Image (cartoon, coloured by chain):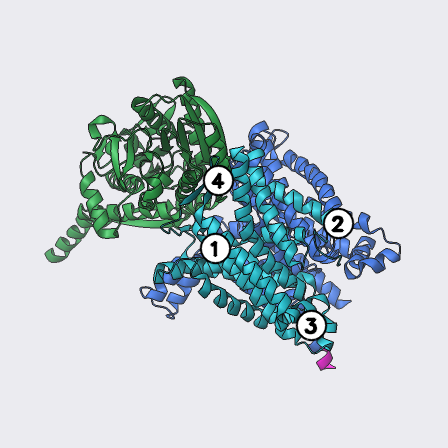
C-alpha cells in the first residue's frame, strides 16, 4: 500500500514539475530538447500498444506518422484550415489507412508481417513523392505561419515562442501514457497480451483475433498520427523521406526496444537515453567534453576527426545500442532493471 | 518496338545482378531461418571494397571480384559466429532487429570513414556499348556483370548439388535436426551459409559498382529489393531467387517506361504484397510457416 | 600615467578594428550535395583570408545542414537566437534556402544566399533575404536562347530530378519554350538515386527531340549522360541546367561529357575584376578548379562581412546597407534590386559554357566567349 502511495506521489511531483518548467526555464534550446523528448515518448508509447502489448511488430509505423503530418500540413498550407481542426482530419484519414493496412498485413505472421508492414510504408512514401498535386511531391510542404489560437476573441497563443509547443507535447505524453495505462489494466489489454503470447491458443479460447489486432492497430495509428501532426506544425516542413521514411519506422521501434516493450515506462526510458544522446553527439557536446577533460587534444588528428564526424555518429550509436540490447538485454532496459530488482529481492530473502 | 526491346534487355541484365543478391539472402534464410536485414548493407560493403581496390590498387572492378568474394565470405562468417549465432533460437523479431542494428552499424561506420558523398567508379569502358541492331544497344559493363553472375550461379549450383559440403548445407536447410542427427555440424553449416550469402551480396555490389553510384545508404534499397525477390521466388529456393531477380529487373525496367519512372518501385512493392498474400511460398518455394 | 592613457586610447581605437564580425554559414558539408558544398566552404575560406588582409576579422559559425531543409531551419534558429550572428551566408540547395528564408525574415537576420536556383525564394517580398546568383528563370532562358541562336530546334525533352530544384527549374524552362514555339515532346521527372534511366532514355530517344534539357546534381548527371550514350540518344544539343553539369568531376568523364552545354554563374575567363586571379588562387590552394558556387560564396562573404563591419555589426543597419549598396568584384557588378516581382535579387548575367576537349569554355554571350560553340552535338562514338 505504501509503495503505491509513494509511486503516485512521485508521479504527481513529476507532473507538477513538468508543468511549471516553462515558467522558470526560458532558454528556447532547453524547451526544444524537452519537446523532442515528449515527441519521442509519444511515438514510443503509440507503437508500444501494437508492438509491445499486442505483439505485432510493425516496422512501418512511419505510414501513420506521415499521414498525420501530411494531412495537417496540407490542410493548413493549401486550405488555411487551422491545425487543431486539421489533426482531426489526420486522425480520420489514418483510421482508414490503418484499417486498409491491417486487412493486408494481419493475414501474415512473424517475419512476413514485418516485411509487409515495411512494404506498405514504402508504398505510402513513394505515393507521396508521386502524387504531386496532393502532396507537392519531393519538394515537400513548407508552412511556418501558424494562425493564432483564439478562444472567443482572446488570443491564447500565436505560436511565436516554443512554450505552446511544450505544453502540446506534454499533453501528448500524458495522453499516450494514459491510454497505455488503460490498455494495460483493461480487458482489452488481456486480449492483446493473449494474442501476443500465443495467437492460436487465444483463438481457440474464442478471442476474435482479427478484431482485437485491428483495434490495437487503430489506437496505435491514431496516437502516432497525432505525434506526426505535432511534428509537422512544430518543424514547419515535411517531405516524404522525413516523415514516411523507413528510418522513421525504425527509430520509433528503437525507443521501445531499448526501453522495454510492453511496459508503461519503457518508452520513457528509451527516450531519455536516445534523445539526449543523439543531441549531445549532433551538437558536438561530446567532443567538446573530451577536449575539456583533456582526453583529446583539439588540434590533433583525432581531435579534428572527432569534431568533424562525431556529430554524424548518433545513428551509429543507435545501431550499437540495438545490437547490445538484443544480445544482452532482450527485454530492454526496463526488463533488465526488473530482473535486477527481482534478483536483489531474492537475495535479500 | 526498339523501346520495348531496350527495356527488356536492360531489365534482364540488371535482373541478373538482383538475382545474385536474392540468392545470397535465400541461402541464409533457407539454412538458418534468419531474415537478414543487413543484406543490402553487406552489398554496400562489397561496393566500397571494390572502390578501394580500384582506387588504391588500380585493379579493375570485375577482376577484383576474385579478391572481394573470399574477403566478404570471411566477413559474413565473422558476423555469423559473433552475432547471429546467439539469436538463432530467439524470437524472429529479435533476429530482425539484430540484423537491422548490424546494418546500421555497417552503413554508419562506412559513412564516418568515407563521408556520404556519392562516389562514381569510372573505368575506360563504363559507358561502352555493344550495338545489337534494331536501334537497341547493350551496356558493356552490365553485360559483363550478367555473364559473371551466370558463371557464379552455375558454380553455386554445382557446389550445392555435387559437393559434400553443398549437400550438407541443403540437408541443413531441409531439416536442421535431422541433419544434425546424421552427423552434420549444423553450426559450421550456418557459418558457411552466412559467409556464402555475404560473399554473393558483396560480389553483387562489386558487379554493379561500375554502373551505379556508391554511397553508404545504398544498402536499404537493395535489402528491400532482395526480400521482394526471395519472397517472389520462394524463401530457400536458389532457382526461385534467380527467376525472381530477373523478373523484378524486367518489371522495374518496363514500369519505368510504360507507367512512369516514379511509380516503378511502387509496382514492385505491390507485386510483393500480392505474392505475400496469395502465394506466400513464392514461385518455387515449398510451403513453410 | 601617460603610458596608461596611451595604452587605453590605443586599445579603444584598435578594439573596433580587432572586433570580429560574427557571421553564420549554413552549408551542405556532408550528404549527397557535399561535393558541391565543398566549393562553397572553400570559397568562404578564401574570402576569410582576403578579408583579414583588408583588416576585416571574421568569426564564422559553421552549420552543416546535410542537405535537409529541417536541419537547415534549426541551424538558422540556432544562429539567430543562440549565436547572435550579424548575418548569415548560405545555404546551398534550393529547398534549404527556401525553408531558411522565412526564418531569416522571422528573426530579422540578414541572409545572403549565394547559389540557390529556385525563383520563389526572392519572390516573396522578404526584406531580409538577398540572393547573389541569377535564379532558375535565367538558367532556362540563357540555355534556350543559346540553342535557338545556334540552330533551329523545334522540339525539346525534359528530364529532371523530382526535387525542388529540378521541378522549379524545368517548370520555368517549360514556360519559356512555349513562348519560343518549341514543342515539349517528353517530360520525365525521376526520383533521385534511381540510377537506371536506360528505358526512360530509350523512350525519349524514340520521340527524337532536338534538345534534351536536364536538371540534376553530380551523380545523376554522369549516369544520365553515360546511359544516353548507351541508348544512342542523339539530340542537337544536351542542355545541362543543373549544378551537376558544371563540376570538374563531370568534365573529367570526357567520353560522355564532351560537348554538353551548360549554364553557369561564373567562369574564370570572364573579365570581372579579380576573377581570373581567384580561379588561380583557388586551384593553388585547394588543388582543383572552382565551380561557380565557390565564386558566388566568395563574393557573398566579402559583401556580407564588409557591410557588417561598416554597419557596426548591427543587423538592422546591415540589412539596410545590403539593400542600398553596390559592389564590383569577381562576380561582376552586384546590386540587390527589386524588379519583375523579385525582391533583393542581384540581376546577374549568366554565362553559357560548353565542355570542349575536357575543358569548360564560355561560348555565350559573345563578349565573354573564349571559343565558338560546337553545334549540333557530334555523333556518339
Q: Which residue is mark 1?
A: B207
At 53% from the left edge and 63% from the top edge, which residue is drawn? B199
The crowd level at tag 3 (other Cα within 10 Å; few <14, some 14-19, many 20+) is: few
What is the chain letter for disc 1? B
Residue A339 is marked as: 3
SS for callout 1: helix
Q: Is residue C313 left or right of residue B180?
A: left
Taking B177 as reference, is C335 above or below it?
Answer: above
Give the overall secondary structure of the magenta segment. helix
Magenta-tinted stretch: A344-349
How far apart are labels 3 and 4 at the CA level?
58 Å
Q: Are dots 2 and 4 on a single chain? A: no
Measured as percent of width and height from the top left, residue B165 is found at 62, 72
SS for callout 2: loop
For the C terminus of chain B, give its image quadrant.
bottom right
What is the chain letter for disc 2? A
Chain coloured blue here: A
Name the one closer to the observer, C42 or B33: B33
Measured as percent of width and height from the top left, residue C34 is found at 39, 48
How far apart are labels 1 and 3 at the CA level?
49 Å
Chain coloured green here: C
Name the one closer to the observer, B141 or C321: B141
What is the chain letter for disc 4? C
Residue A106 is marked as: 2
Which of label 2 and label 4 is nearer to you? 4
SS for callout 4: helix
Chain coloured cyan here: B
Amino acid at each position: 500500500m505504501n509503495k503505491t502511495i509513494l509511486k503516485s506521489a512521485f508521479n504527481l511531483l513529476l507532473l507538477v514539475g513538468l508543468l511549471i518548467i516553462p515558467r522558470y526555464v526560458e532558454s528556447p534550446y532547453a524547451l526544444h530538447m524537452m519537446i523532442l523528448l515528449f515527441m519521442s515518448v509519444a511515438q514510443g508509447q503509440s507503437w508500444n500498444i501494437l508492438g509491445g502489448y499486442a505483439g505485432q511488430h510493425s516496422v512501418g509505423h512511419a505510414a501513420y506518422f506521415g499521414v498525420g503530418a501530411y494531412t495537417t500540413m496540407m490542410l493548413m498550407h493549401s486550405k488555411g484550415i487551422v491545425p487543431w481542426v486539421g489533426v482531426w482530419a489526420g486522425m480520420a484519414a489514418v483510421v482508414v489507412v490503418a484499417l486498409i493496412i491491417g486487412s493486408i498485413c494481419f493475414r501474415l505472421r512473424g517475419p512476413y508481417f514485418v516485411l509487409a508492414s515495411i512494404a506498405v510504408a514504402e508504398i505510402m512514401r513513394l505515393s507521396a513523392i508521386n502524387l504531386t498535386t496532393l502532396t507537392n511531391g519531393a519538394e515537400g510542404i513548407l508552412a511556418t505561419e501558424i494562425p493564432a489560437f483564439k478562444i472567443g476573441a482572446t488570443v491564447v497563443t500565436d505560436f511565436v515562442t516554443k512554450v505552446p509547443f511544450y505544453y502540446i507535447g506534454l499533453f501528448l505524453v500524458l495522453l499516450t501514457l494514459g491510454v497505455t495505462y488503460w490498455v494495460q489494466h483493461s480487458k482489452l489489454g488481456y486480449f492483446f497480451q493473449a494474442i501476443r503470447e500465443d495467437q492460436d491458443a487465444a483463438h481457440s479460447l474464442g478471442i476474435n483475433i482479427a478484431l482485437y489486432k485491428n483495434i490495437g492497430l487503430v489506437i496505435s495509428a491514431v496516437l502516432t498520427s497525432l505525434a506526426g501532426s505535432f511534428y509537422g506544425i512544430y518543424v514547419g516542413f515535411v517531405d516524404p523521406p522525413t516523415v514516411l521514411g523507413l528510418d522513421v519506422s525504425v527509430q520509433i521501434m528503437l525507443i521501445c526496444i531499448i526501453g522495454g516493450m510492453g511496459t508503461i515506462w519503457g518508452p520513457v526510458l528509451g527516450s531519455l537515453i536516445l534523445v539526449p544522446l543523439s543531441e549531445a553527439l549532433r551538437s558536438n557536446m561530446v567532443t567538446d567534453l573530451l577536449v575539456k577533460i583533456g582526453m583529446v587534444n583539439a588540434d590533433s588528428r583525432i581531435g579534428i576527426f572527432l569534431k568533424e564526424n562525431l556529430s554524424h555518429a548518433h545513428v551509429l550509436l543507435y545501431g550499437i545500442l540495438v545490437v547490445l540490447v538484443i544480445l544482452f538485454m532482450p527485454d530492454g532496459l526496463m526488463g533488465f532493471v526488473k530482473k535486477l530488482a527481482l534478483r536483489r529481492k531474492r537475495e535479500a530473502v | 518496338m526498339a523501346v520495348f526491346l531496350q527495356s527488356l534487355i536492360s531489365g534482364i541484365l540488371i535482373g541478373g545482378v538482383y538475382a545474385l543478391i536474392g540468392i545470397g539472402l535465400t541461402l541464409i534464410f533457407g539454412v538458418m531461418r534468419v531474415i537478414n536485414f543487413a543484406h543490402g548493407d553487406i552489398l554496400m560493403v562489397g561496393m566500397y571494397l571494390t572502390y578501394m581496390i580500384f582506387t588504391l590498387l588500380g585493379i579493375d572492378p570485375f577482376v577484383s571480384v576474385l579478391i572481394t568474394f573470399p574477403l566478404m565470405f570471411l566477413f559474413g562468417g565473422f558476423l555469423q559466429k559473433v552475432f547471429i549465432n546467439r539469436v538463432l533460437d530467439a524470437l524472429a523479431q529479435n533476429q530482425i532487429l539484430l540484423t537491422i542494428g548490424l546494418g546500421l552499424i555497417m552503413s554508419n561506420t562506412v559513412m564516418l570513414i568515407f563521408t556520404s558523398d556519392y562516389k562514381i567508379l569510372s573505368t575506360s569502358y563504363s559507358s561502352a556499348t555493344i550495338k545489337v541492331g534494331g536501334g537497341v544497344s547493350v551496356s558493356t559493363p552490365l553485360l559483363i556483370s550478367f555473364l559473371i553472375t551466370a558463371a557464379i550461379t552455375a558454380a553455386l549450383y554445382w557446389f550445392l548439388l555435387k559437393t559434400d559440403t553443398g549437400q550438407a548445407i541443403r540437408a541443413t536447410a531441409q531439416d536442421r535436426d535431422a541433419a544434425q542427427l546424421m552427423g552434420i555440424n549444423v553450426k559450421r553449416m550456418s557459418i558457411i551459409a552466412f559467409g556464402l550469402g555475404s560473399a554473393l551480396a558483396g560480389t553483387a555490389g562489386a558487379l554493379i559498382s561500375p554502373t551505379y553510384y556508391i554511397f553508404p545508404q545504398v544498402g536499404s534499397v537493395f535489402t528491400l529489393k532482395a526480400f521482394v525477390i526471395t519472397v517472389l521466388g520462394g524463401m530457400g529456393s536458389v532457382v526461385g531467387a534467380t527467376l525472381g531477380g530477373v523478373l523484378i529487373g524486367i518489371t522495374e525496367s518496363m514500369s519505368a517506361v510504360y507507367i512512369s519512372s516514379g511509380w516503378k518501385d511502387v509496382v514492385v512493392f505491390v507485386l510483393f504484397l500480392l505474392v505475400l498474400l496469395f502465394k506466400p511460398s513464392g514461385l518455387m518455394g515449398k510451403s513453410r510457416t | 600615467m601617460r603610458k596608461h592613457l596611451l595604452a587605453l586610447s590605443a586599445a579603444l581605437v584598435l578594439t573596433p578594428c580587432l572586433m570580429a564580425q560574427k557571421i553564420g554559414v549554413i552549408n551542405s558539408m556532408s550528404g549527397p550535395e557535399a561535393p558541391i558544398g565543398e566549393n562553397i566552404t572553400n570559397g568562404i575560406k578564401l574570402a576569410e583570408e582576403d578579408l583579414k588582409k583588408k583588416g576585416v576579422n571574421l568569426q564564422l559559425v559553421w552549420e552543416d545542414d546535410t542537405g535537409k531543409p529541417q536541419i537547415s531551419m534549426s541551424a538558422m534558429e540556432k544562429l539567430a537566437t543562440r549565436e547572435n550572428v550579424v548575418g548569415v551566408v548560405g545555404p546551398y540547395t534550393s529547398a534549404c534556402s527556401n525553408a531558411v528564408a522565412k526564418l531569416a525574415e522571422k528573426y530579422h537576420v540578414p541572409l545572403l544566399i549565394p547559389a540557390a536556383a529556385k525563383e520563389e525564394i526572392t519572390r516573396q517580398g522578404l526584406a531580409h533575404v538577398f540572393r547573389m546568383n541569377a535564379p532558375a528563370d535565367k538558367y532556362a532562358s540563357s540555355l534556350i536562347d543559346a540553342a535557338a541562336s545556334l540552330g533551329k530546334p523545334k522540339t525539346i525533352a525534359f528530364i529532371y530530378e523530382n526535387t525542388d530544384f529540378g521541378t522549379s527549374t524545368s517548370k520555368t524552362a517549360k514556360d519559356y519554350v512555349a513562348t519560343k514555339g518549341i514543342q515539349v515532346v517528353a517530360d520525365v521527372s525521376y526520383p533521385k538515386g534511381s540510377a537506371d534511366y536506360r528505358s526512360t532514355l530509350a523512350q525519349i530517344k524514340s520521340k527524337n527531340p532536338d534538345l534534351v534539357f536536364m536538371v540534376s546534381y553530380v551523380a545523376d548527371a554522369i549516369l544520365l549522360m553515360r546511359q544516353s550514350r548507351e541508348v544512342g540518344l542523339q539530340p542537337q544539343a544536351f542542355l545541362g541546367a543543373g549544378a551537376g553539369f558544371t563540376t570538374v568531376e563531370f568534365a573529367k568523364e570526357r567520353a560522355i561529357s564532351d560537348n554538353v552545354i551548360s549554364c553557369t554563374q561564373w567562369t574564370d575567363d570572364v573579365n570581372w575584376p579579380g576573377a581570373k586571379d581567384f580561379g588561380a588562387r583557388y586551384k593553388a590552394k585547394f588543388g582543383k578548379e572552382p565551380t561557380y558556387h565557390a565564386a558566388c560564396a566568395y563574393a557573398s562573404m566579402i559583401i556580407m562581412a564588409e557591410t557588417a563591419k561598416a554597419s557596426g555589426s548591427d543587423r538592422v543597419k546591415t540589412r539596410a546597407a545590403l539593400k542600398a549598396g553596390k559592389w564590383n568584384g569577381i562576380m561582376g557588378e552586384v546590386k540587390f534590386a527589386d524588379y519583375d516581382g523579385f525582391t533583393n535579387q542581384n540581376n546577374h548575367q549568366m554565362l553559357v559554357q560548353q565542355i570542349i576537349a575536357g575543358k569548360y569554355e564560355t561560348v555565350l554571350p559573345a563578349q565573354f566567349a573564349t571559343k565558338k560553340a560546337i553545334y549540333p552535338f557530334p555523333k556518339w562514338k
